[in-house]
Image (cartoon, coloured by chain):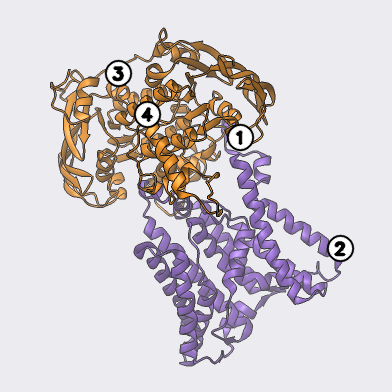
Chain colours: A purple, B orange
Amino acid sequence: MKASSKNKQSISLKQFLSRPEITMTFVLIIFCLALTLASDVFATPQNILNILRQIAVYAILGIGEAYIIITGGIDLSVGSLVGWSACVGGVVAEWGWSPGMVLIAMLVAGIIPGIINGILVAWVGLPPFIATLGMLNIAYGGALMITKGFPIRYRGTWLHQFGGGYIGIVPISVIVTIVLVIIGYVIAEHTIFGRNIYALGNSEKAAKLSGIKTDYVKIMTYAITGLLAGVCAVIQVGLLGTADASLGQGAELDVIAAVVIGGISMSGGEGNIFGVLVGAMIMGVLRNAFVLLAVSGYAQIVALGVVVVIAVAVDSLRRKKATV
Amino acid sequence: MSEYICRIKNITKEFPGVKALNNVSFDIKRGEIHAIVGENGAGKSTLMNILSGVYQQSSGELEFDDEPVRFTSTKMARQKGISMIHQELSLAQHMTVAENVFQGRMLKNRFGFVDKKSMHEQTKTALERLGAGYIDANGLVSSLGISQKQLVEIAKAISTNAKLLIMDEPTASLTTNEIDFLLNVMRGLREEGVSILFITHKLEEVLAVADTISVLRDGEYIIRLDPKTTSMSEMIHHMVGRKSDFNSAREFMDSDSSSPVILEVKNLSVPGYVDDVSFQLRKGEVLGLTGLVGAGRSELLNAVFGYYGQVKGEIFLKGEKVTIRSCTDAISKGIGLVPENRKEAGLFLKMAVRDNMVLVYARTHSKGPFMNMKSTTDLAEEYIEKISIKTPSIMQTIVNLSGGNQQKVIIARWLLQKPDILMLDEPTHGIDVGAKEEIYALINDIAKQGISVILLSSELPEILRMSDRVMVMHRGKLKGILDHKEAEQVKIMNLIFDQEIGMTT
């Protein structure tokens, strides 16, 4: 009896291998193996950690973006929320707030526009694309206003450790990223809130009829994304030592790309949070490859575009095949 | 010219791992209505898809209009004279009726522009042939009701001079008088010499309209029946391959039963849908709810369930007045709803069977934010066993289950809650005969456990068979509540169409 119930739960190896995030993990491994052969520098711990540090922001923002995309929404404001939070932090630091208070200010600065995004989508009923496109500009403009367009230098404090510090040879930002991805995964798969996110993305009506407070779930996903933008702001100012309104500009596209490459369907309702890390890694490894192989920066942009299109095309084709 | 329009000879269709059709042979006469019946998965759809050029047979031959054919596309089948009318209508909503009728073959005038005038005229002629001249050929399809859309689909088919019309569940979403109209249209087409292949779950329609009945089961051709000499239970017998216990009735509850009133609804209104409805529901009772589509039946259930927020009227549970502001409230007060339209409103299609089943339970029964994986997994397995849900694993994505099993998962979702009241909105819509029987048995069981059931259905045999009392709605108003002893088809029909009881016999 015990054995048979075990058996019922497990899914076949074939089903497991056909999951998009697993396919993309193999793609990532193949890229890495190829690069190990092509370049002596690639497989050094230094280089790998460097890649991870570069993708930290995309992976962290990707967790929140993935939640939103799974519910069936999208958030275009993630990039400029990073810039906005960093600038708020810079301003209050200049006022002489303690590093702890600056940290809290940055996180709150991220959460508030996130909640506003959520309210616009859930209560006002704006399409997520429009609500967050508006917020993209509001946050960027707001950041320019409070800094008058000039970068703000941060005094060095312990706060910088999140972006610039190391434990041994491992950057703290990489540790933060991995911890957040694990937490993000556990929330998605093992909490009731997480399962409600997926349920909402499958059918809003069915979710409502199951007693799920759909408005609350939506607002929470945008708020979480805002909070993560605040975290990224802390990492970025730690790395750069300055806050600048243009920080994070355009990041939303790379974040969405990472989410999509990681196998999270744009049509909502499915996907695995670890896929976000895989998607971000693929993009990071590709960028790194172009540098190591000394290919022009312009070709790099083209290649990233191609990868995104291929990743989505593979997903669509599989979906088509599954429905016939 | 032979007497047959289409001869199907030893057709076999294999999909990876499944033989969907196995050596099927039969003939369709010119100008006959040929019904195909069988349970879901019997191979009906596969057969239709081969005839209409969607799939190609693995082996076997097709002869159409006295010549051997092999269709490689739907266009080819259409050119030969086979038109299929799909279950999900395939009309362009924001285009006119005439444009839809000429979809893919629009007429051109001598300047090469679309010739709207001729298209309009020909569409009008086609619609008049169907007795539906009242439909405006220049109107937008989106403004039409579902039965009118169906007529547009048929007009589209006959305007291409189709010789064989394949109709897949054409009456699934129609009301009783719309069905009658459609069946008459079909008879009219037969008079004109058009052959119709009619696929349906509704066996009374088969008996009413078909000239020949073919039964498929598990991909095999079982038997050819003559509707004049066969009966519904004989058909079912061949479809399921075992003796049908169609007439196994439940033990009805008497109207003077001492069973306590569990739910009392007083003067409930939903503007535009439900108008001042009051009724009572007893413990362990099955209360049938019927009426025309659009009579406000689903809206009544949704309102009691809190889907529209707080509505006008009073609701008493076990004698106590309650306020229901949301579905969450209704659930916490012991009410469950299996909604109409399983795929959109009931299921989370891309999620596992387990998650679909335990989602509500996990939320209402766990103390912290985490799902208790072990207890929910055990519960899911227990209920899969208990109400015999057929699934390879509890982690199977629910979209892969058959309609009947999907519905059972949703029912299980509420049984886990141990509710006082379970409302079922068209629970057997679009599921096959065998699975229907299982759902009936399940409802019977639920009522025996003391759970009160409201069963909303458009199918009168279902209502009559299951209900202790029958509630009939017409245009938002409650027209009457009949005890099972007085409930019979004619009386209910009179209430459904808002006629005084006794006026017609």
Q: What is the chain letter for disc 3?
A: B
Name the residue at 45% across, 78% down. Answer: A109
Q: Position of residue B13 (x, y in %)?
A: 65, 26
Q: What is the chain letter for disc 2?
A: A
Q: Which of marks 1 and 3 is nearer the N terminus?
A: 1
Q: Which of marks 4 and 1 is nearer the N terminus?
A: 1
Q: List the residue tagged with mark 4.
A: B182
Q: List the residue tagged with mark 2.
A: A37
In the drawing, what numbered circle is on residue B54?
A: 1
Report crowding for label 1: few under 14, some 14 to 19, many 20 or more residues within 10 A (C-alpha). some
Relative to residue B121, is residue B65 depicted above or below?
A: above
Name the kind of residue labelled 2 in the image. Leu
Quadrant in the picture for residue B192 = top left
Classify mark 1: helix, strand or loop. Answer: loop
Check the picture and name the quadrant holding the N terminus of chain B: top right
Q: Earlier in the sequence, mark 3 or mark 4?
A: 4
Q: What is the chain letter for disc 4?
A: B
Name the kind of residue labelled 3 in the image. Arg
Name the kind of residue labelled 4 in the image. Leu
Q: Report the front residue among A100 and B505.
A: B505
Classify mark 4: helix, strand or loop. Answer: helix
Q: For this view, does A304 lie left or right of residue B350?
A: right
In the drawing, what numbered circle is on residue B250?
A: 3
Q: Position of residue A123 (x, y in %)?
A: 34, 63
Cα gap from disc 4 to disc 1, whole angstroms? 26 Å
Report crowding for label 4: few under 14, some 14 to 19, many 20 or more residues within 10 A (C-alpha). many
Cα gap from disc 2 to disc 4, whole angstroms? 70 Å
Relative to residue B361, is residue B401 depicted above or below?
A: above
Report crowding for label 3: few under 14, some 14 to 19, many 20 or more residues within 10 A (C-alpha). some
Q: Where is residue A269 in the image (x, y as percent from the top left)?
A: 51, 51
Task: State which mark lies toward you, 3 or 4.
Answer: 4
Cα gap from disc 1 to disc 2, whole angstroms? 48 Å
